[in-house]
Amino acid sequence: MQTIKRRIGIFMHQFDGGGAERMTVILANALYEAGHEVTFIVRSGKGESRYLLRTEIPVIDMDIAERSKLEKNIRNIRSLAGVLKGQEYDVLFCVTAEMSQVAAIAAFLCRKRIPLVEVLHNTLSMETHSFQKIREKAIPLLDRQFDRVIAVSQGVREDYLRVSNASGQKVVTVCNPVIYPQIYQMAREDSGHPWLVKERKWHTLVLSGRLSYQKNHMFMLRVLSRLCRDEDYRLILLGIGELEEELKKACAGLGIRDSVDFYGYTKNPYSFYADADAVVLCSRYEGLPTVLIEALACGARIVSVDCRSGPDEILAHGKYGILVEPGKEELFAQAVRESLREKPDKDALRRRAQDFSLERSADGYLRIVEELVNGEKI
């Protein structure tokens, strides 16, 4: 049967190197390859994930410079309203809660009926913003503008239902398109990092994520200082962010400056995961942490805090990795030591990762597109 080409718009802030942006680009490529017309609308066309995007997919860059939060969002709304007036989309996917709220207002102002789908990558109740109180009151009002809400995990879905007046039927869980064929090839490549050589006398841990409040790197630095009391442990931090200098000072204060490498952004984190002694996650909150699924695909040991939400779902209540109560530094250190005593069942880990495949995710998104095109309302 021939695919009916749908016009799919994707609105997000920019092409950052974070999980949400990378997953959105991978999904967009799959939708394009399935025969659909895909267009990105972004506040800024810059970012580390841009290189992943197929060159055939157009990007409408609104080129909104960094300003105050309020002024930036006002310009976002005006610019997007102008774009929507001149474009025709069968559906517009809006990535993250902030961009979704901008889109809801812009669609209202341009007085044009466009099916809107909000895509949530985090537990909304845990996010902190300057206008949090206003946002909390606005969520139930703006929710009426969305035809569907996609939550990337069951935990994100349940959280959204608690803070909104949305119908349970309107909010659907579609996991991120984390696993795609190239991952396995990239995992076999050499990272080139001196701490990941095959024959080594130390233990190397990898933590991947933006250097931000949410990712809680300070917790892992304190855990590392405990581990280093007895053995030689080293930590590679993949990612960039506003807390880098603060975290470097903390390393010096904890006496672990030579045991932590602020590696920065890499196009191939998979080779790091595959060669690490363990991949760790210590976030305050998540949605569906991509790094854990990628680590499964690479056959890596995993130690993660059991934060809201995603780690428990991904690791199946501890079947595919060790879960630790948030805030428990000594328990986390013990879990790291324990994980290294066991040889991981790499085949089982990779099979679990396939539950989060690109094909499953793309099918979920396209099912929603067809429902909205065919006028199925909830």
Image (cartoon, rainbow, N blue to C red):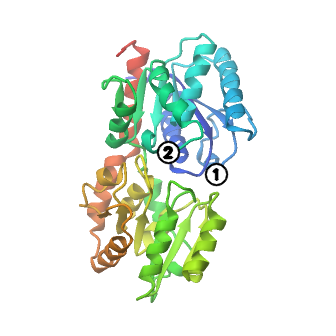
Residue shown at the point (34%, 54%) measured from the top left: 311
Type of amino acid under label 1: Glu
Instruction: Say if residue 61 shows up in the picture.
Output: no
Q: Is residue 196 left or right of residue 344?
A: right
For marks 2 and 1, the one nearer the N-term is: 2
Q: Is residue 86 left or right of residue 169?
A: right
Local SS, label 1: helix
Q: Residues within 10 Å of mark 2 (few under 14, many from 20)?
A: some
Residue holding disc 2: 23
Residue shown at the point (52%, 44%) measured from the top left: 128
Residue holding disc 1: 48
Residue shown at the point (50%, 57%) measured from the top left: 215
Foreground residue among 375 and 223? 223
Q: Is residue 200 left or right of residue 154?
A: right
Quadrant where the image shows the N terminus:
top left
Say above or below: 149 vs 346: above
Among the 4 quarters of the image, the one containing residue 191:
bottom right
Quadrant where the image shows the C terminus:
top left
Among the 4 quarters of the image, the one containing residue 150:
top left
Type of amino acid under label 2: Met
Q: Is residue 94 left or right of residue 203?
A: right
